[in-house]
Amino acid sequence: MELQFSEAQTLVRDTARRFAKDVVAPQARAIDREERFPKEIYRQLAGLGLLGVNIPSALGGSEAGVVSYALAMMEMSAACASTSVGMAVTNMCGELISHYGSEALRQKYVPRLTSGEAIAGAFALSEPHCGSDAAALSTTAQQRGDTYVLNGSKQWITSGAHAGVMVVWARTAAEGNRGLSAFVVEGGTPGLHVGRAEDKMGLRGSNTVGLTFDNCVVPAANLLGKEGDGFKLAMIALDGGRIGIAAQACGVARAALEAAVRYAKDRQAFGHPIGDFQAIRWMLADMRTQLEAAELLCLRAASLKEQKKPFTREASMAKLFCSEMSNRVCDRAVQIHGGYGYIDEFPVERYLRDARVQTIYEGTSEIQRLVIAREIIRLAGP
Ligand code: COS
């Protein structure tokens, strides 16, 4: 993409691109096939400053901003979306604690995330009975002296079995979204049980588990913000997280398009490379156009967040458009490959499997449309 980026943004993008191409991409097929959680890669990402791209350097981050973060996510996702989803959640947890944690929480936990000591962060909001309706969650946190006692279950927790630092949402009071609070919980805390890893369609190298809290005691000082702040903190974190998933979608789609172009130039039919035929050319033209439109939406949302301007609607638009685009582009890439697209000799079947969850996690396409429509109507005034 030919947009003008600052020196810092270009440096982060190029660092991520080089590492993604040289180190991550060659392992991506094995990470997927062997369901290999990429622990060592996370340590290396930490060394490159990519686990805290938008986090102050005093806390071990690279303080390079949200646009840099989106560019880094695009690069990592083009190589391996299993790896990039864990990178995204770690950045998200680090940012949340860095912005809303007490000074003690920031100093204690953010450097563990940015340095890779925690391996990964985890964002524990969804529960077996509620994903879209986040305010309906039923895990409880009861204050007992200078601690809270957590009880309940979480589901779909990315990196949950490996995360050294988690942000966990629980109910501290009965009433709806105002009764939710967020806590920093260390992996391995007694009473926190990790369920079996889900056997997923895609992102097979990432780890997705349920968590059970059975009288799990956390220090009261690990409350993020105040009691009752939890729902808003979740919404704020998800607004930012959606930029990360939009960027992931762009990265995966770019990889799929590049593979399709290579194949179209190479594969012969009827005496020509198939890229000579209009049927294929029109697919490639649509794929490229949609990808570039998606990248612009993603970077606009990132730029607004970086400028500290409102970006809820733009993040949801980016997440909606980029994730649906990436499913279309990956599907077309498989189609261009014909039978070879359906086997694992070529990477496009992995891209399509990895893209599928992008319209679901961090808010489904339906939730993004709900958020966008509400913002349009709200901003239109009375
Ligand atoms: N930023 C800051 N505050 C926000 C916000 C945002 N993006 N969105 C909502 N809020 C605030 C509202 O302003 C409101 O505050 P007040 O009570 O002070 O007025 C409060 O949060 C409740 O908001 P609302 O009434 O809009 O909540 P709803 O229960 O209607 O739910 C949706 C809103 C559906 C948008 C929310 O539940 C959501 O995003 N769900 C999807 C969750 C998700 O992405 N799950 C995937 C988990 S991660 S894999």
Image (cartoon, grey):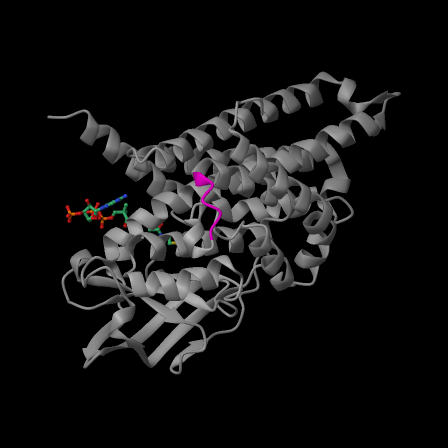
Q: Quadrant of the N terminus?
A: top right
Q: Which residue sits at x=25%, y=33%?
A: 375
Q: Which residue sits at x=34%, y=81%?
A: 214
Above/below status of 236 relative to 216: above
Q: Nearer the viewer, residue 168 or 11?
A: 11
Q: Residue 133: x, y in percent? A: 28, 54
> Can residue 122 be seen at all in this image of the molecule?
yes
Judged by its main secondary structure, the magenta piece is loop
Q: Nearer the viewer, residue 41 or 207?
A: 41
**Residue 308 lies in what quarter of the image?**
top left
Q: Residue 339: x, y in percent? A: 76, 40
Q: Residue 202: x, y in percent? A: 59, 53
Residue 159 lies within the magenta run: no
Could you tell whether 315 is left or right of 24 in the image? left
> Can residue 121 be seen at all in this image of the molecule?
no
Could you tell whether 272 is left or right of 315 in the image? right
**Residue 103 lies in what quarter of the image?**
bottom left
Above/below status of 339 relative to 90: above
User: Which stretch appears magenta?
Assistant: 61-65
**Residue 178 lies in what quarter of the image?**
bottom left
Q: Which residue sits at x=52%, y=60%?
A: 115
Q: Which residue sits at x=43%, y=66%?
A: 165
